Image: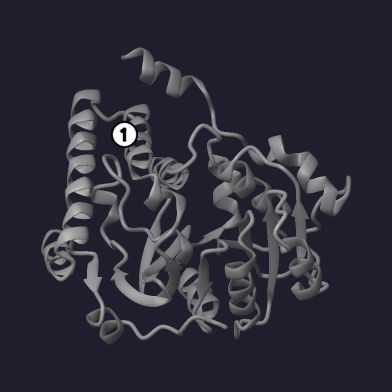
Amino acid sequence: MTDRTAQSRSVAAPTLDDYLWVHRRRFGDGGLVLADPRRPKVTLVTVTFNARPTLERTIASVQGQSFPSIEHVVVDGGSTDGTIELLRDRLRPSDYWVSEVDRGISDAFNKGVALAAGDYIQFVNADDWLSPEQVSVAVRGLEETGADFVFGDLIFYQDGRPSFLYLGEASYGAVIRRRMPALNHPTVLVRRTAFERIGLFDLRYRCAMDYDWFLRLHLAGGRGVHLPGLVGHMTHDGVSNIQYVRTICEVEAIAVAHGRTPGLARTEAIFRIAKTAVSQRVKQVAAPLYPLIRSKINRSYVPAPAALGRRRGAPPFS
């Protein structure tokens, strides 16, 4: 075992008990009363920092859901761009928000879970928005399948226009030990019990924390189900897309920490970094060829306008 692997395995991800102080801030020393009939079924968690223009769209998509039993928890990292005023004005009395400096996205995610009152939890961040029926479709799928989580397909947008559709990878279990499959985090609805079972997001990871969490759940026997009728929306400006080298290196470290052979993981990481660099260059100098080439080498990728023909999601909320 390498020193790097040993170090990775020696540090455990935080648990809900580690965020008990956050939980008590909302629910008091008695904690959440699970038997309370007024408790929402679903908690939608939004993590944000200085993203007021897109956050308004996210809030509108949450409040436009047809599913009746929803609360919205917003964890803001201490924004100074008018976000606090927006939250005061737009959130409903049943929603909850906090604004304070945090230790990164993983920490903010963990706070959101600790503040959640619902049986089911979904992250919909300030660059994401929901289709009007998205929560209803996800809840029905989760309850009918008995899975630990469900996930769908994701439409990415560039400059306000649909860029491509990323299909969820139904057979994700075959590849998750070596790479992050297309689980499309903004479409995932997960049971609260999954967090109670395996813990929260690891603070060491700033880009690929979701890969680590899903891999841990998979290794613990957790099960996810792809729902083709479930469609989410996301801009193409997220941290993991912009910092792709860091994301790939974190995926490598996570895979090794959970048993992947270091040499194989390093080779795969180098290949992914090179492939991404080449694809970005092709996108710059031969943009019309990029969607065609990518769709040939990645079965999850469906370029626009074919994407909209296969999955008719809602347009962005204004």
Q: Is residue 251 left or right of residue 100?
A: left
- State which quadrant residue 286 falls in: bottom left
Give the residue at x 57% y 69%. 54
Rendered position, 311 above or below 302: below
- Quadrant occupied by the N terminus: top left
Give percent across and percent down for residue 69: 68, 76
Give percent across and percent down for residue 261: 23, 26
Give percent across and percent down for residue 280: 23, 54
Front residue of 2 and 157:
157
Front residue of 120 and 34:
120
Front residue of 195 and 293:
293
Please say whether residue 229 is visible from this viewpoint.
Answer: no
Give percent across and percent down for residue 210: 45, 47
Q: Residues within 10 Å of mark 1 (few under 14, many from 20)?
A: many
- Quadrant occupied by the C terminus: bottom right
Q: Label 1 sits on what residue type?
A: Glu
Give the residue at x 22% y 81%. 306
Mark 1 falls on what kind of element? Answer: helix
Q: Is residue 113 left or right of residue 157?
A: right
Q: Which residue is mark 1?
A: 252
